[in-house]
Image: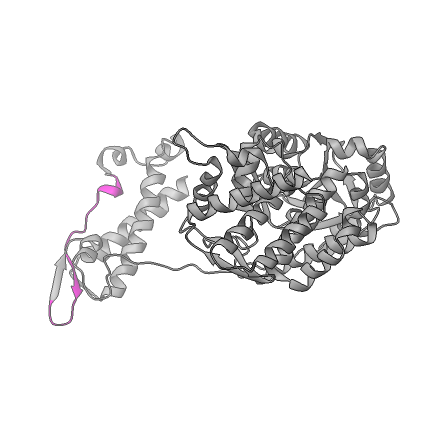
């Protein structure tokens, strides 16, 4: 501190010498002097105001009574700003800036610009926890092959129940690859399903476990489970501490062919789906097709609707294949399911990487065809509907609306509805007909919530043909009610057969 004091005194003398005579400074030099003075004054004023006995003992007694804080010093004379033909006298750099001389802007802006490349592999494999399968090892070590990586595992409780011995298999894999993998804790079991995203306390509980195990930004969180677990646990990891490395092992059709390969994480709040969340690309994704074998027929069926959605948006050939393969898919033929999952995942990845807006800064969500209604429908049913089941209804509803508005041919609507029904998906739920006290359909509130989620103008993606999306910014609620009525009548006629 004695050294700091001496430096401060020398700086004080230097300042007084510099300011004892009239100076004629250009505006650019004036700004530089102003900045230097501000830094020195702030530093020295702080250093000498600290109540440090060491400083006082090294200073003459008179200094305590005669010295005044540097922050109170003012220039002994004036500075002038050269404005060309006239000089502007000022008493301080701040007033010089206020005088508005050339090169002394009243306000300024510095535009920061940088870009970050993101890259993550998506593995399509089977029996990823077989020690002979190197996908997980390669995912963990792809950037640093010469070290042992710490891994915190999180497992969907439903997957744990359907895969006896899953914990032992995970431990055996880590033991076999002990030179590269260290499990820092036993698997953290979390109940899956959309309701897991409705409890914010679970995020905090996971973050506490991350803290207790001492994992850091070089450590990994390995998440085995469906889309809801991936969303919730991924959000916890993305915000602790400002982002842990996440390896996803999605276990459902919908998470393997859509959400699990993407960059979104989040939880529900205020009865709004994904109201709280973050964009955080995973470090890697491992799609283990063996997990699909553990699912109920209902869960396998529901996930196929996301493939129908992305085919209608981006690949008419894939849509035709889905129509032709509907019987195989409805019977969960392993080869057909594997092809469907892979192509759907590829199309989602192509959009994220090449669509120009991977983090959705704009007002459009082009991959959310049918989702404005699906999200609201999930909420209205208390998440008793699977996400994929709600998406199927949303797709059919928006296709019928497009027919009502002359955007889509009726023959395409028939193809879409027949495909979804052939897959075993129902296209109606009674909550769609429920109204509020004013007589307005509750489901229509989903339009405003969809717009509010992104901000800006309402943007709902429709199609004019398979593979040809169209963004619309206004929805005619009367036509949407007609579309809902059409769906209801179609459903009733099928039930009556």
User: Compared to 305, does 321 lie above or below?
Assistant: below
Q: Position of residue 109 (x, y in %)?
A: 33, 58
Residue 122 in the figure: left or right of residue 453: right
State which quadrant residue 154 falls in: top right
Quadrant of residue 415 in the image?
bottom right
- Residue 344 appears in view: yes
Nearest the eye: 160 or 421: 421
Viewport quadrant of the C terminus: top right
Percent across and percent down for residue 412 are 61, 58
Image quarter for residue 53?
top left
Q: Which residues are magenta?
A: 69-86
- Is 221 or 369 nearer to us in this picture? 369
The quadrant of the picture occupied by the N terminus is: top left
The structure residue drawn at horizontal position 76% and vertical position 31%, both measured from the top left corner, is 186
* Along the line of sight, the residue nearer the viewer: 90 or 126: 126
Farthest left residue?
86
In this view, the residue in front, 181 or 12, is 181
Can residue 243 be seen in the rendering of this structure?
no
84 vs 439: above or below: below
Residue at 80% x, 46% y is 331
Q: Is residue 333 magenta?
A: no
Q: Is residue 48 above or below residue 119?
A: above
Q: How many marks?
A: 0
Residue 263 image offset from top left, x and y in percent? 60, 50
């Amino acid at each position: 501190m004695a050294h700091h004091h001496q430096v401060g005194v020398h700086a004080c003398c230097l300042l007084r010498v510099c300011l004892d005579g009239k100076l004629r400074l250009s505006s650019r030099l004036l700004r530089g002097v102003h900045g230097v003075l501000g830094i020195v004054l702030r530093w020295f004023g702080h250093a000498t105001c600290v109540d440090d006995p060491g400083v006082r003992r090294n200073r003459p007694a008179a200094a305590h009574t005669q010295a005044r804080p540097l922050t109170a010093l003012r220039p002994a004379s004036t500075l002038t700003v050269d404005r060309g033909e006239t000089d502007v006298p000022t008493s301080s750099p701040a007033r010089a800036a206020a005088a508005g001389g050339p090169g002394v802007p009243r306000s300024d802006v510095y535009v920061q610009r940088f870009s970050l490349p993101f890259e993550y592999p998506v593995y399509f494999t089977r029996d990823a926890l077989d020690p002979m399968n190197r996908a997980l090892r390669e995912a963990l070590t792809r950037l640093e092959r010469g070290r042992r990586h710490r891994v915190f595992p999180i497992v969907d409780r439903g997957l744990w129940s359907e895969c006896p011995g899953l914990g032992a298999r995970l431990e055996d894999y880590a033991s076999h690859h002990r030179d590269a993998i260290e499990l820092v804790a036993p698997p953290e079991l979390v109940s899956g399903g959309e309701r897991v995203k409705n409890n914010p306390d679970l995020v905090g509980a996971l973050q506490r476990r991350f803290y207790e195990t001492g994992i850091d930004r070089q450590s990994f969180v390995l998440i085995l489970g469906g889309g809801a677990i991936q969303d919730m646990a991924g959000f916890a990891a993305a915000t602790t501490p400002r982002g842990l490395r996440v390896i996803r092992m999605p276990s459902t059709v919908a998470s393997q062919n859509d959400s699990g390969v993407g960059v979104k994480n989040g939880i529900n709040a205020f009865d709004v789906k994904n109201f709280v969340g973050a964009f955080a690309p995973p470090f890697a994704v491992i799609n283990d097709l063996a997990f699909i074998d553990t699912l109920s027929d209902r869960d396998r069926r529901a996930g196929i609707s996301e493939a129908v959605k992305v085919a209608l948006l981006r690949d008419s050939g894939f849509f035709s294949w889905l129509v032709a393969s509907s019987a195989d898919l409805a019977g969960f033929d392993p080869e057909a399911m594997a092809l469907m999952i892979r192509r759907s995942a590829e199309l989602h990845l192509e959009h994220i990487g090449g669509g120009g807006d991977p983090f959705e800064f704009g007002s459009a969500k082009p991959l959310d065809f049918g989702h404005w209604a699906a999200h609201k429908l999930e909420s209205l049913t208390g998440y008793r509907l699977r996400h994929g089941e709600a998406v199927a209804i949303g797709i059919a509803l928006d296709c019928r609306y497009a027919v009502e508005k002359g955007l889509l041919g009726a023959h395409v609507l028939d193809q879409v509805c027949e495909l979804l029904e052939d897959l075993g998906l129902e296209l109606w739920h009674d909550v769609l007909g429920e109204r509020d006290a004013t007589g307005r359909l509750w489901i229509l509130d989903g339009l405003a919530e969809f717009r509010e989620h992104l901000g800006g103008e309402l943007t709902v993606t429709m199609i004019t043909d398979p593979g040809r999306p169209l963004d619309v910014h206004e929805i005619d609620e009367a036509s949407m009610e007609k579309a809902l009525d059409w769906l209801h009548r179609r459903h009733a006629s099928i039930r009556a057969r």
